[in-house]
Image (cartoon, rainbow, N blue to C red):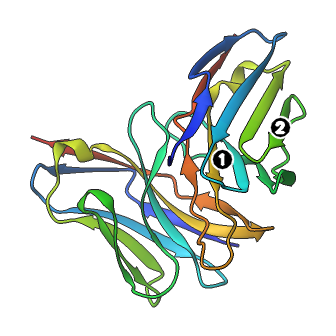
Amino acid sequence: DTEVTQTPKHLVMGMTNKKSLKCEQHMGHRAMYWYKQKAKKPPELMFVYSYEKLSINESVPSRFSPECPNSSLLNLHLHALQPEDSALYLCASSHPIAGGNTGELFFGEGSRLTVL
Amino acid sequence: AQSVTQLGSHVSVSEGALVLLRCNYSSSVPPYLFWYVQYPNQGLQLLLKYTTGATLVKGINGFEAEFKKSETSFHLTKPSAHMSDAAEYFCAVSARIIQGAQKLVFGQGTRLTINP
């Protein structure tokens, strides 16, 4: 199993809604990532979890709240978003870089978010 | 700081022709380098990677890349383009490692179009 599964694939929400994006992997990876990708742009890192602990937060606004309940799951809780937050949200996972592992990221297909 | 420059935001080749996508990097340490491909409305898929060792790296779908330290380049090539190669291609360098997780810095991407 070499998949990273993201749900939902599409999400439309109003600025006052609360919603969550979910990500799951069963490759035994201990690092998980959230990226944001705007149209015709490269992915931008938002958060990194390593061994279920938040290790990188790229100064993301607090209306985005990540959660890593266990080593296989990663959530992104959304609240009071703005229209400019509309984007493709990509989850990725990797083995830690150690012992010969080179830590390449495996990406899910993304959740396309539209904020009205 | 690590960075990546992809020369040419859009490359167009004929089916059967050579594909060459250019990537130059800047890194203060020996780099980990990656090429990812993104098909429309999908996530990113790893094509190939360079970490250490052999400088000519072969990947999936007939692609290969050569790491040239003296030129700080990692150009992606394929001898004969196929219609299914039409996609967005991202070069990335590993910029930071924390607790085994790595931050990738992506280039701006190159959109590859294949003409029949």
Q: Is residue A40 above or below residue A27?
A: above
Assess whether mark 2 and mark 1 are in contact (beta carbons under 8 angstroms).
Answer: no
* Viewer-proximal residue among A35 and B62: B62
Label 1 or label 2, whichever comes before in sequence order: 1
**At x 75% / y 9%, what residue is drawn?**
A14
Helix, strand or loop status at disc 2: strand
Residue for badge 1: A44
Q: Nearer the viewer, mark 1 or mark 2?
A: 2
Up/down of A112 relative to B10, above or below: above
Q: Position of residue B93 (x, y in %)?
A: 57, 67
Q: Nearer the viewer, residue A83 or A25?
A: A25
Picture quadrant where residue A96 is located: bottom right
Mark 2 surroundings within 10 Å by alpha-carbon count, few (fewer than 14), some (14 through 19), many (20 or more): many
> Which amino acid type is marked by label 1?
Glu
In the image, residue B24 above or below residue B106: below
Residue A34 screen position, x and y as percent: 70, 43
Q: CA distance from mark 1 to mark 2?
A: 15 Å
Question: Which mark, residue A66?
Answer: 2
Task: Classify residue B30 as left or right of residue B98.
Answer: left
Pick the quarter of the image with the C terminus of chain A: top right
**x and y percent of residue A37 in the render?**
60, 38
